Amino acid sequence: MKVLLATRNPGKIKVYRKYLLPSVELVTLAELGLTQEFEEKEKTFEANARAKAQFYFNLSGLFTIAEDSGFEIDYFHGEPGVKSRRWLGHQATDAELVDHLRTIIPTIPQDRRTARFVAVSCLMKSAEKIYCAHNAIEGFVSNDIRPVHQPGFPYNTCFIAKDFNKHIEDLTPAEIEKVGHRFINIQSLNKYL
């Protein structure tokens, strides 16, 4: 079964390739030569993921998985949220976003640092058949800001996962599988596939 993963994020491609059913032949936008860019204009993760899945499904004719995900910091009223990559007013690099985190996190009171990663993954099989999975990892932001270990995931650098009270970069693969928002979504997509 050939399925298009509608992302250019190398980190997401790696995770989906690792955890999707072995029977799925996952192809990327680059592998199909699709250069058209989808502009995320919606106000929710699900609306963006659905619209992106529809856009690339129409272009490719393949079953299509699209995801919208982001980082919510409660002290900033859920920002950056759906604008996580564009929080600085432009398509920011990992390094720019990490530099921004180094500036703003120390300004947040210690007792108001709750945050979460949110992901909505949508699989479109046809115009009438679309399935969306929603999950989040709860935690808080920390002054302990790490280097970017996985390109495409700048917010991992500052996040402590609540369930383990550990920096997300220090979680074992088994721990990530227990709380990982993207991993849990992929398990749901596997059942739907």
Image: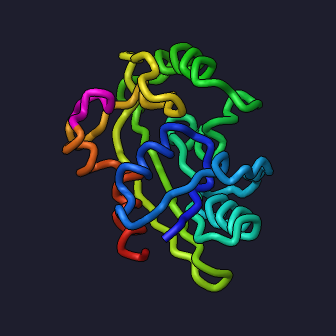
The residue stretch that appears in magenta: 165-172
The image position of residue 187, as x and y in percent, is: 34, 63
In the image, is 165 to the left or to the right of 121? Answer: left
- Residue found at the very far bottom of the displayed protein: 128
The image position of residue 23, as x and y in percent, is: 38, 67
The image position of residue 125, as x and y in percent, is: 58, 77
Q: Report the front residue among 119 and 3.
A: 3
Rendered residue at 36%/49% (across/down): 18
Q: Quadrant of the C terminus?
A: bottom left
Corner quadrant of residue 81: top right
The image position of residue 138, as x and y in percent, is: 35, 45
Q: Report the front residue among 149 and 133.
A: 149
In the image, is 112 to the left or to the right of 12? Answer: left
Compared to residue 53, the image places residue 145 above or below, namely above
Rendered residue at 69%/56% (across/down): 43
Rendered residue at 68%/60% (across/down): 52
Q: Is residue 74 visible?
A: no
Compared to residue 184, the image places residue 132 above or below, namely below
Q: Report the front residue among 126 and 164.
A: 126
Is 139 inside the magenta-drawn segment? no
